[in-house]
Amino acid sequence: MIPPQLSLIVKNVDLNLDFEDFCSEIKLLYPSVKNVIRMKNKFQSYIKLVKLELISSSVREELLNGKKIIIGYIAYDITEYLAPATVLICSKCMGLGHFKKQCSQIKNTCRTCGDLVDDLKLHICSKIEKCIHCGLDHKSNSLKCHVVKSFRSELTRKLLSSNNHPSHVSQNGIIDLNKNVNIVYNNSHFPNLPVAQNSSSNHMLNKLDNLLAQIADVNVHLSNLKVKNDKIEQIILAKNDSDILIKENLNLLSKQSMELKKEVIVNNLKVERHENMFTKLIIPMFEDFFSFITVQNCDSNGRTLDADLKLKLERYLIQMKKAKEASLSPFEFYLFCEILEEWETYPNLHSCFSRWQNFIQVSGKSKPKLLSYNILSFNVRGLDLRWQEVLLLISSFNFDILVLIETGIIDTLFYEKIFSNFKIFYQKGENKHGGILVLVREGIFSNRIRCDLPNVCVVDIKGEEDFRLLGVYAPNSKSWSWDDLSLFLTKKCIVYGDFNVDIMQDGQKAESLLEWTDIHFLAPVLPSSVTSLRSNRVIDYALVCGLNIDIQTYNGNTTSDHRPIISSIPFTVARQKLDSTYNDYIRFLFLLSTRCTTFFSLDKYRLALPVELRSFLSYIRALSFRQIRTKCFMLKKEVLFLKKIAKKELNHFFTSKLDYLLHVRNSSSLAAIYFWHKSKHCLKPSSSSIHALINTSGEIIRENEQMCELAADYYESFFKSSNIIRPHPYTDSPPVMFDNMDEVIPEVTLDELMSSVHAKRKKKSLDAHGIANFMFNFLHFDHWSLLLKLYNYSFQNSILPTAWKDTRIILLAKKEHVCPPSLTRPISLLDSFQKVGEKLFLTRFRNVLFRRGLLPDNQSGFRENFRLQTRLLLFLEDLRSLMSNSSPICTIFVDFRTAFDQLWFEGCIGKVRRLGIPPAYLNWIYAWLLDRRGFIEINETRSRWFNIDKGCPQGSVLSPTLFITYNCDLGSSLAGCISHLFADDLAGIVTGQLGIKYTYQCLDLEKRLKVFIDHLEYYSCLTDQPINTNKTQALFTTRAIGHPKFDIHFNSGSKEKISWVPEYKYLGYLISSKLGWGKFLKFIMIKVRHRISLIKSFRLFGCTSPALRKALFLSFVLPIFTWVYPIFPFLSVKQQSELSHFYFSSLRRVMFCLHWNENFFAFALDEKSLEDRCAAYWERYLHALADSTDGLLLFEKANLNVLRQSWINKDFSIKCLRKSKRFISNESVIETVVSWLSSVPSLSSIPNYELDEIQLLEDFPESFLF
């Protein structure tokens, strides 16, 4: 490309033409033109000059010689481009127009003061600016001088005049300004005008003939209109007679209506009077009477004398309570009358539906003001180097708050301009590399809290959620301790930072940090992946108290050695023929429920106080206003005294409300629902919500409509049927005849249907038609009689209503809350009535599976009497037994990619048919799978409908059983391994040959693993169940020290390598290579600490109590400990004692009783130890195993271990297998558990103190050691 100074200028280019077409035509005619640029004036407005930048000098000379360029049939002048002239100023004399070498002046001129000196280095300047050209106060070489400007403009004028072409002059010597030389006229560019054609006929006569014909047609139409008019007059006469008759009937009906209204009013008064008498007199009287009889029915010790009489009285009380609740309020009665009138008034069903359609609550496009605070915590390692990366993150994620760590010394004025939409709070560090910068978006009220600690910045955030935010950089050389931060902690606070402590790996450092967090009820919230790229550890995270937080690492590219941490603090919950007949029915239910629902906006609310308390507060408020007006001192004392009384009464009222909620929390009342909703929202927040989606180009989509369509595009492609190579053994092999081909699906009885409906949980989640299971509570018995016929018809004919196959799909995040659609989990909300039918079919289908014995014993998922704990124990039993033989063991944990969503419809039916399932069942399952469709819903916004051609819906009760039936031969297809299945989770245990050297065993293990992978890939291809090669991992287990010296590869595709891992989370438990439980216990303890900090900050009505905290502990913390129950007997004695101590410490911390020792705490609160709870669990568990297949499998393993021990003791021999010194004794799982149970005291471990000892404790507490 030639220099830009040699560009060309095209003149007089119209501003209104299409510039893109203009550019493309130039580049088409002259390919050597690189850029076409329209020029701008000093006001940055486009002008009629266009600059051409070229890459060929020959084309430039050609255009200059031609002096014109023709574009779009218009000729434009073209000339050279002249850049603005540059003024040359001598650096010696400050003169214009020559260089220093050409200067004739002997002395030097100072450019500041204008003095002539011999040597500028020895010159002492006065610093008073004076120009030698104009004498004004600026430097002599300044371009602002008007003399320099004049010289430059004159020079530019000369250059332009020498390059301008002369104007067009007419023959008489006058310049023709109106002549447009840009237009070139050519006759060939325009088509010739058509030649006029002369007609030889007379047009006027033709027109007259046409008019006469049209008049004749008009006469015919008028005669027809006359006939129709006569008929209409006859109809009008008949109508008048009918109207007179109708008026007479209407008058009669109005008289009857008035009489009916009078009778209704009289009857209403009578009904109201009798209802008041019944509800306010008779029912209370009978309640008192029954209570008296109940008291008399008990003896002096409180025992019931007549149990039948007690049951009758309780039944009568329940019936009277229902009778009181069955009465309608005036508002409900009025609404009922309105609905009944609408139902009777409208002529057909659809017109009534159209009326009720207006009562549907539309959410609209408006969004809540703010759903959460989006926060970025980023160790930038020098903000001057990475401020542009921070700006890119802000533009991508729209953060509200940023905590930038290790910023170094910064220029705050510069960053105030860069981050103009944020308030800046900066705290310097201990050296030039430290420093914390907190940025809070404008519009969020924030206040800086003074903190003199280096690398610590404290800011209060006030808004939808008030909390305190601390930004911390804690290097190893920090001059302060964790306790120095305690002064800045509040009940709701969050600490972001680089702590330089990995809680899972750093022993003593982590313990000191965790001790400090436990004291202040701070819960560490860790991201799922490493944050330090240099040390490969998790050292950037958050400490939280009183808040819910979702946190994740940013996996994009970064130039820092720390990954950015993205988190979100939510604070508002946003948030609210056969086919024809069934569609009308469900639409009727949906619209009727909508018509019966009243919506109203609720911006603010407060707890309803009793009338007397509200009146007392109003009196105090009025009295305080009077005191302000009168300035009376006595009145002020009275107001203060009354305020103390009011505060005491409010506390008493709120405490009583709290006690009531605790008392009824396990009932089905609305108060219990409120209690658990509030506690679950604060202590067990949902972490699966989606905040945004990422499209294929990496752009983050936050708008609901775009998110829905993006997800719909992905899942529409995802749910398309796979291309299966035919013929296939599942679908095209010869059919097999069984003895049950004529078996039909048993009919459903009404009692069975009602039992299934009553047993179903009444949830409020809506299906695709707006109906929820919660509505079943209000459906009359007759509705189910109608639906019973529908279910039996469906089972007999394998026909399902089309609406049963409509699915509302909700997306849940698998891990991160901002993710592409491929990392979401689709949950199908099926038709509410169809789910009842699924449950009825499932009981019959399971009966067939049980009778044919199709499901293997190594499959424990979604089966009755097959427990997850048993599958874990069997897995551990196999590993312990193989390890006792000193064999190298490899466990392949196989992950099938979206297994439930990959079900091949035809292959599933063909395979299940070959298993001997009757055709009636197969036909219904096939009809259930086919022709399904769904839509995606995100934040009350729906996508388009799309077809679902594969996969069984996640959310159906039938899907898991159908899936495990389809894969029932998975374990037998993998030869040479011990397989353990839980739904789609496969753990295959492969070991080397017994009785040979360890080195040969490893070689044999490698060969067997290759065979295992071959069989696994073949089964995956056969069933169309793709393997997730990235998540499939291997665990090497052996008694020997060392790691495997070979790799495992898949044979198909890109031959990915299966990675070896030191531990793997299987069935919720962290399995290590040496079967140790240290990391799993540490994970349990961190989770418990997190829950305890939330319990401490939890409030109901602004109150808390020991009873509340204990109830929350038993509901939300104890279930975490229950995960330890199955493995507690296998822990070491030290681990058992530490875990038991941690259990009591956690409970004492919740009850604020850390100053008590464990024995006294257990006695005072009658609390069982963790060991006692585990022992009680195992006693119940062993009792349940006595009559189950699970127990039989465990006892078979125990018997096998006994036979092995006898063989080792040389009680008998086995051919082809020799004994080895490396064979050690092994204790089976059952033996270990029974041995541990025998060591646990049979009585409770709670100490039993005598009354004398308790009295001594009260009199002489100092003599007791705590």
Image (spheres, rainbow, N blue to C red):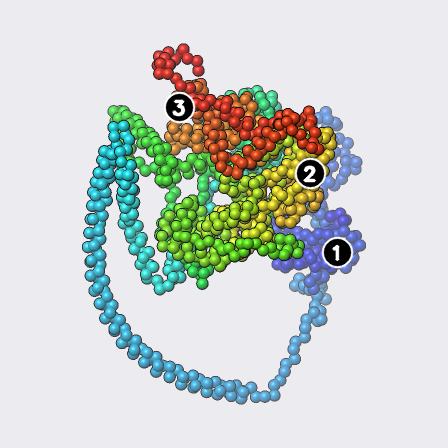
Picture coordinates of residue 665, whole percent (x, y): 38, 35
Mark 1 nearby-residue class (10 Å; few <14, some 14–19, many ≥20): some
Is 910 left or right of 756, judged from the image as shown?
right
Regarding mark 3 in the picture, which secondary structure is present there?
loop
- Relative to 979, say whether 12 is above or below: below
Q: State the residue in front, 1047 or 148.
A: 1047
Q: Quadrant of the C terminus?
A: top left
Indicate the amino acid at tag 1. Answer: Pro
Q: Which mark is residue 1009?
A: 2
Indicate the amino acid at tag 3. Answer: Leu
Picture coordinates of residue 600, whole percent (x, y): 37, 47
Spatial CA distance of label 3 from label 1 is 92 Å
Indicate the amino acid at tag 2. Answer: Leu
Upstream in sequence: badge 2 or badge 3:
2
Residue appearing at x 26%, y 38% in the figure:
309
- Relative to 962, say whether 511 is above or below: above
Spatial CA distance of label 1 from label 2 is 63 Å
Q: Which mark is residue 721?
A: none
Picture coordinates of residue 1124, whole percent (x, y): 52, 30
Residue appearing at x 68%, y 54% in the figure:
50
**Label 1, on which residue?**
31
Regarding mark 2 in the picture, which secondary structure is present there?
helix
Picture coordinates of residue 100, whole percent (x, y): 77, 36
